Amino acid sequence: MKMIPVSTRINGDEREFLCAPDETLLDVLRDRLGLTGSKEGCGTGDCGACSVMLNGRLVCSCLVLAAESEGAEVETIEGMAEGQVLHPLQRVFIEKAALQCGICTPGILVAAKALLEKNPDPSETEIRYWLAGNLCRCTGYDKIIRAVQEAAAEIRRLQP
Amino acid sequence: MTFQSGAKRDFQVVGKRLVRPDGIDKVTGKALYGADFSAPGMLFGRVLRSPHPHARIVSIDVSAAESLEGVKAIVTGWDLAEPEDEAIRDIRDNCLARDKVLYDGHAVAAVAATSKSIAKEAIRLIKVEYEILPHVTDVDVAFRPDAPAVQEGRSDETVPEESSPNITRRFEFGHGNLEDCFAKADKIVERSFKTAATHQGYIEPHACLASLGSDGRGELWCCTQGQYLVRTVCSEILGLEASQLRVTASEIGGGFGGKTTVFIEPVALALSGKAGRPVKLVMSREEVFRASGPTCSSSIDVKIGMTKDGRITAGEAVLRYSGGAFPCETVQFGSQAAFAAYDLDAVKTHGFNVMTNRPKEVAYRAPGAPMAVYAVESVVDELCQEFDLDPLEVRLKNAARKGTLSAYGPTFNEIGLMATLEAAKAHPHYSAPLGPNQGRGLSCGFWFNFGGNTCVSLNINSDGTVGVVEGNPDIGGSRASISMMAAEELGVPYEKVRTVIADTNTLGYNDTTDGSRVTFAVGLATIEAARDAIKEMCGRVAKLWGIDEEAVIWENGCAKPASSNAGDFEPMSLADIAAIADNTGGPIAGHYEVNADGAGVSFGVHLCDVEVDRETGSTQILRYTVFQDAGKAVHPDYVEGQMQGGAVQGIGWALNEEYIYGEDGKLQNAGFLDYRVPVASDLPQIDTVILEIPNPGHPYGVRGVGETSIVPPLAAISNAVCRATGVRMTELPLSPARLQKALQEA
Amino acid sequence: MKYVRPDSYEAASALLGEETGIARILSGGTDVLVQMRSEVVEPSLIIDLKHLDGMREIVTEDGGFRIGAAVSGAQLAEHEALCAAWPGVVEAAGLIGSSQIQSRASLAGNLCNGSPAADSVPAMVAAGAVARVFGAEGFRDVPVAEIPAGPGKTNLKKGEFLISIYLPARPERAGDAYLRFIPRTEMDIAVCSAGINLVTGEDGTCTEARVALGAVAPTVILVEDAASALIGSKLDDGALKGLAAAVEAACRPIGDKRGTVEFRTKTAGVLARRAAEIAYQRAGAKR
């Protein structure tokens, strides 16, 4: 298989890589670029653990061919905090015990951030439906939903 | 030195909602899970799996695969060693089949190659000739004497003659005279129930990175609930010495019991040994469903007698569980747990394990208990309806309590069932109004809780900080709770303690993270290790002060004179003592090794409101409240998290989750699309009420909390559906098609 | 496998026409990549067309909407005029997968994947949507209902692919709705589904109706008898019963892991009735 050269911007940094035509963006993030924060729970778009932002849209990186990301802006969990400063969602998730094993957490944080950027004041139902593609098997979702609500309120307070 | 005990103690750290130490790593993507490791020169492994549910392997031809460029090693079951222990031989044969494949997805061979795509191609070049054998996947069919034999000669002496060859073992528990006590009942209800096999559904597939040298030294990184168990099993399966195989547990992306055995680890080690290079092996989600352990499917008959005022006179159950293609003892837990919530004069359970052509069962949260309790709690509910009695009052009337001779043998000590029932009764949820097509159900739940082999080392660092070394993977916040107990006992701030999880060569043996044992047993060992260190510190101070050791006490993180009689000395803090340890005898550490008992059983009660769409058979959970005894909640957030997570897994089991096999014996739904775990939008908030009835077996009163919460939802939901619709369902899951059909027929 | 990003429709059609192995068009990729991952389909050629002119745009045309083949579900939901005119189609597309899938999944991809359970297809068929197909001989317009040929199969010829879907202009007092049954609330494939599109007169009498069903036959089906049951009525109980009966009579589903024959048949009738009531309300008529 002939390798394809790809230039992207990942978490603000220019990244160039070679990939096989059948490699997914998730494969490249994890295996070629060392960004293992995006997780593979299913490989078929059913669990959301590989969620990233692609040109400002929330996607499962397991359902994107790496070659498609030519010229794209990609944001992963590794780019969510600004240096040492956690995003409010990240901080509240820790404070409110919204994670147990933590494997779904990167995907859920990326997805929740995408929601709050689109809708700063979502209802509980809106949060639950938005996150329906992010499976969590530990928490029963309760503390996750509450943490998203609390982080949303905090972000609204900071950005009136 | 004496130490204050019991949950009445005035806790400084324990009971607070503190920030977990691994939080930042886990919210920033830095935490390393099973598939996140790599090594220089690493190869990629892949497993070839059987497409047949039952077949004899006539031959395996690997020549074409071997000659593919980039293929560095191929292994089959015959490359593995011959362990003495039969249970470990079963694990070996499950990791790579030898003579027969026993289920759809059973591993047959594996390759290691320089890329994933070459490994995939190589797998297709392996030619396996199979002789197809008749298969059986249903527990009741497999129970019949004329059923196809999954394996021959696996029945032990407990199994009656002339039984099905698939019955491997029979268990019996109970006491009292059934006949006399059933005769006292005003009504006896007998019902048969069936529950589907479910999967733990952890989001992280099994993954490992193995490196095995020709000198027999190995390194294994993997996601597991027990690195020591992995070491024991892998070293036997590979013929290695345990000391030469170092196993390091990665962060673990969920287990729920499913990561208490091995599937790919011995295969990766064998491939690495052959190739002379590290091998990474990661299961796909499809492989997880087809070939890692689901729970048992079950078929249960229950008979219960009740007087018209709600006293249960006797109970009996026959439980047939299928643990897949190998002998399995999970039905023992089910037979013990079935009637555990009740104080009965006469009770008997008979449990049978039945082999079927399904994957080898692995523990799933309170293994064996949910289906047994579902069957019993359904019949109790039916009797309550029969006599028009309040189901909570009937539970209160019959509840097991301190002094009850339990249905499975022991006499209960301090237990929290009455307290949880009273709490449920007093809760606004129990009296909230219901609308049309809505119903409220409840169920009790129970888990034994485990203790077990545990080692902890606790190091006092020269800067006054504390390092705890323990041997159980942190699956849901245990680093926090262990650090909290160390801080509590030593009297230092929580932030001064760091707990790490040891590899198998760094600390003595620890049992697996299972049975809700960690907060109890590792907590106990941590407290004792802290006390060991305190003794040492008090001894050092006594020498400095020139007084007797007994004259020094430990209070609020400081060594002090026991009384003014002991002398007038300034208290010395842990940091003060640590700073001069070089001059008082060298480094200070405490340690503790124990095979802990006294885990203290845990009871819970769940209340559930549902609404049923009578036209489609769809059930919506409207409201859900969990009441559970935690002994002492060390970190209430994570106790609630266990209660909520278990409840939701139980909701999935009740409503939608099931292994679906076709007539061809193949698994039809090996993915998250059709194996339907609950998603966020399926659920309401899960409210929790923590009860604290101290466990006398733990210095702080702690009981395990992880398992009990998955037990009640099955019956709570089924009972709620019955009260919403008038239809008693006796098969799980309560899928819309099943419920719609039952409603039409009603 | 090759991955190609041709720079024109003509080049794409030529590549498709020449390919001797399995070729797949990437519009959103949410089916193609799943099939590749599951090793169900192993294409030798992937043609990425998302960057071509018009593929990611929604434009108004003759009062209706031309939706590029790679327009995502999320884009549809963000288009206010489209949501106002065809809420049923937009909701149907919105039911495909998760928020993540919505960023990528397209109407055209959902249609060309050929699943009888595709959520957007009954809604599009009920809407009378028309697909614009490009091939060796240039453009042709084909009713959406004529694209599916059976599970996993379409009536597209070699070298052909979809470039857009057209939803016609709406008359006064028109409404559409789509409902599906799934065991959970999200993340499932429809067990059965119904799309209804209707127009009413000033007095609330239904004057036109189209009823399409999903997952109850090898392709999405348009049920004329069901439409007849509504036309001329004010969706009274009798008409709705007639609708459900006609729907049940038209169902010839398979029984599989997702649902039994009986369940699909019965539930399709229930959904059609409920969808009809929503569509009727949207048309501005009250019972």
Image (cartoon, coloured by chain):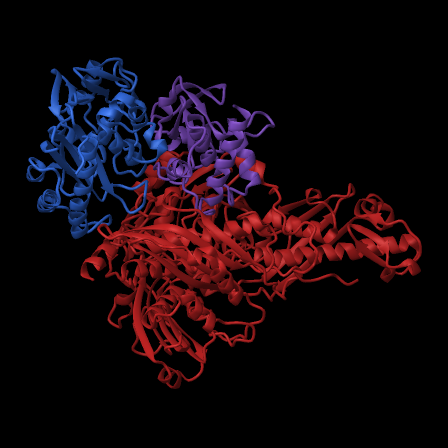
- Label the red chain with its letter: B
- The residue depicted at 6 percent of the width and 39 percent of the height is C225
Question: In terms of depth relative to the viewer, which is nearer, B345 or C272?
Answer: C272
Left or right of C135 in this view: B278: right
Q: In this view, does B373 lie above or below B406?
A: above
Position of B476 compared to B488: left or right?
Answer: left
**In which quadrant will I find the C terminus of chain B?**
bottom left
Q: Position of residue C90 (x, y in %)?
A: 25, 29
Q: Residue at x 81, y 50 (%)?
A: B558
Pick out the residue farthest to the bottom: B180
How far across and how far down the image is residue B196, in percent? Answer: 32, 58
Q: Which chain wears blue? A: C
The chain drawn purple is chain what? A
Rendered view: B38 above or below A142:
above
- Looking at this view, is B223 or B493 the one in front? B493
Q: Could you tell me if residue B157 is visible in this image?
A: no
Quarter in which the N terminus of chain B is drawn: bottom right
In front here: C186 or B252? C186
Determine the image quadrant of residue C139: top left
Relative image position of residue B231 (x, y in whole percent): 54, 53
Q: Is residue C283 visible?
A: yes
What is the count of numbered marks? 0
Residue B569 pos. (x, y %): 91, 51
Relative to B242, B382 lies left or right: left
Residue A65, compared with residue B604, is above or below; it is above
